[in-house]
Amino acid sequence: MMTPIRNALLVFLLATAVVVAGDLGRAAAQGYPSAPIRIVVPYAAGGVSDVLMRIIAERMRQSLGQPVIVENVTGASGSIGVGRVARAAPDGYTLVQGNWSTHVANGAVYSLQYDLLKDFAPVGLIVSNPILIAAKKDIPANTLKDLITWLKANPGKASQGTNGSGSVMHLAGVSFQKETGTRFAFVPYRGGSATMNDLLAGNIDLYLGPAGDILTQYRAGGVKVFAVMAKHRMESAPDIASVDEAGTPGLYVSAWWGLWAPKATPREVITKLNAAIVDALAEPVVRTQLAKLGLEVPPREQQSPEVLGTFQKAEIAKWWPMIKEAGIKPD
């Protein structure tokens, strides 16, 4: 039986342990970083996710005074790499670059071993890649309204390339069909380059894909682009109308990337990491490199951890019902 004295002593020891642990955590955060930082990119080397993170990581290294190492961990649509970081120590030395697929769509398509909202601490929104509505060169339409009219006159006959079931390209097409009352087939590819090759060859009719995949061929006259699926025109392609201007207001779809740490990472650490991201995105050389990839840097006020957390929740609320309604399953 525990006596009042022993009970009081136990309470005192537990309280002391909590205080000491808190002091140690604060001390570690104040000395952060004191070792290399690893950022997991859950996709293969050479893709847009990998290239943009290496651009940002180099500038973060200068701000943080420690090496920032990018590690590619592939598999299961990015969930293997993301899962590894969910289980990592919350000390700020293991982070994950996530995007619309890994931190929104995967939660509705896959049975994950982690919670997308509860197991991660947002660090900051990095970039977005607005989706363009593109078509093969000889499609009989010159405006978005023309395209919709043609698709309605030919239900089920056209085809759109995607990066697979549940990809942002696939969901852009699903959203487009729902909003415009059109119907066309989806053709999955392993990546944007393969999709563009078939679009150029005329083997598919449409590609609702990231600007980074499409802009080069659009500027060379190889494909038609009817609109960007965003409220405003892109800085890197101001000649392309927004969907609002083209006649389908509110049809917004964008690929985007952010940075997350494991849950319970100290607030002081998150603040230092976010400051490094903000510094990187303000660098003119970095912005030029990202623009060449068709990527848009968010305004400064949208680069905070709080904005990323709120934005991710809003995207989940928007897309999960649509994914489930469409019956999208893993490939």
Image (cartoon, rainbow, N blue to C red):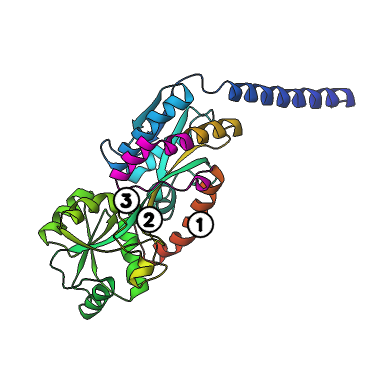
Dominant SS type (magenta): helix
Mark 3 touches mark 1? (CB < 8 Å): no
Disc nearest the viewer among 2 and 1 = 2
How far across and how far down the image is residue 62, in percent? 43, 25
Q: Earlier in the sequence, mark 2 or mark 1?
A: 2
Q: Residue at x 24, y 53 (%)?
A: 215
- Which residue is more in the foreground, 65 or 32? 65
State the residue position of label 1.
Answer: 314
Vertical placement of residue 259 versus 175, above or below: above
Question: Residue 254: which numbered mark, if any?
Answer: 2
Distance between the alpha carbons at the discs numbered 2 and 1: 13 Å
Residues shaded magenta: 277-304
Determine whether, in the image, residue 34 is placed left or right of residue 218.
Answer: right
Q: Earlier in the sequence, mark 3 or mark 1?
A: 3
How far across and how far down the image is residue 218, in percent? 20, 56
Element under disc 2: strand
Distance between the alpha carbons at the discs numbered 3 and 2: 15 Å
Mark 2 touches mark 1? (CB < 8 Å): no
Question: Residue 236: which numbered mark, if any?
Answer: 3
Q: Is residue 53 visible?
A: no
**Amino acid carrying mark 3 in the image:** Ser
Quadrant in the picture for the N terminus: top right
